[in-house]
Amino acid sequence: NRLLQVAANVRGRVTAIAVDLGESVRSGAPLLELESVDLGRAREEFLREASALRVATRSHERAKALVAAKAISEGEFQAREGEYFSRRAAAQAAERALHLYGEDDHEIERLRQAVEQNGALPSGDPPHLTLRAPFAGRVIDRKVTPGSLVEALQPLLTLGDLSTVWVIAKVPAAQAAGIKVGQPGRFETVALPGQVALGEVTFV
């Protein structure tokens, strides 16, 4: 029931793979890393909009003090307020774009700190994106290797939670009427001697 094809929302190049086929991973564990030009552009857009919002916020705060002291007209204040709201909306849109690309809150906060310092990404900071496991499971398929060029939404690997699995069984027609939803089941196989799996019928 928990089976996921892991993909990125941006195109890029696979730079590292932290897991191998058949490996068990915990929730939140890194799976692979991408380097993406598109992500780099989205980060730069966020920095531009966040910097513009910072300037507009200061201007808006000054305008509130000035209009209260009647040092500027109401029209001038409304113009600055409109610019502030416009910049805030643009910065929020740029942040949403980063979230859609897969950036986490920690990385976005790091970008905000860069805005507070000098408004630019740290020198030598490549646009890397780390894809993490959304739940604990096992890697049951892997379609890429380091260096692979991938498109957005291209399946990269498959993660499955094998703690609960399906058993699909065929029974003779004469016995089918005796199989009911909710009926307990017991499963054994010669491949796993001495191991018994218990469950119940969920679908006929």
Image (cartoon, rainbow, N blue to C red):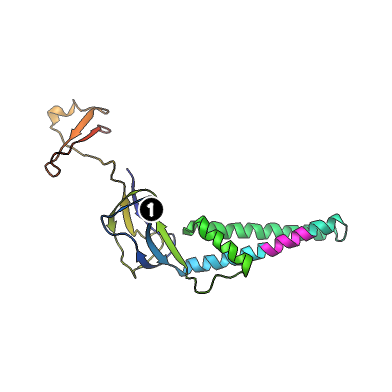
Span of residues in magenta:
54-62
Residue shown at 40% from the left, 58% from the top: 131
Q: Residue furthest bottom?
A: 124
Q: Is residue 60 magenta?
A: yes
> Considering only vertical position in the picture, is 170 above or below 7?
above
Instruction: Check disc 1 and give the amino acid type.
Output: Ala
Q: Going by the picture, which residue comes out furthest to the right?
A: 70
Percent position of residue 34, x then y: 40, 65
Of residues 1 and 112, the one nearer the viewer is: 112
Q: Position of residue 87 (x, y in %)?
A: 66, 60
Image quadrant holding the C terminus, namely top left
Q: Helix, strand, or loop for circle 1?
A: loop
Horizontal placement of 93 versus 175: left or right? right
**Main SS class of the magenta portion in the image:** helix
Q: Position of residue 148 (x, y in %)?
A: 34, 69
Which residue is located at x 28 percent, y 59 percent?
A: 20
Does residue 134 belong to the magenta stretch?
no
Quadrant that contains the N terminus: top left
**Residue 191, how many percent across, how many down?**
13, 45
> Does the rendering let one see residue 148?
yes
- Disc tally is 1
Q: Which residue is mark 1?
A: 133
Q: Could you say which quadrant of the image residue 21 lies in?
A: bottom left
**Residue at the top extreme of this rendering:** 178
Near mark 1 (Cα within 10 A), the count class, few <14, some 14-19 or many ≥20, is: some
* Depth check, front residue: 34 or 149: 34
18 sits left or right of 107 in the view: left
In this rendering, the answer to whether 196 lies above or below 65 is above
Most foreground residue, 179 or 200? 200
Q: With 101 as the anchor, is 193 left or right in this view?
A: left
In this rendering, does residue 74 appear at all?
Answer: no
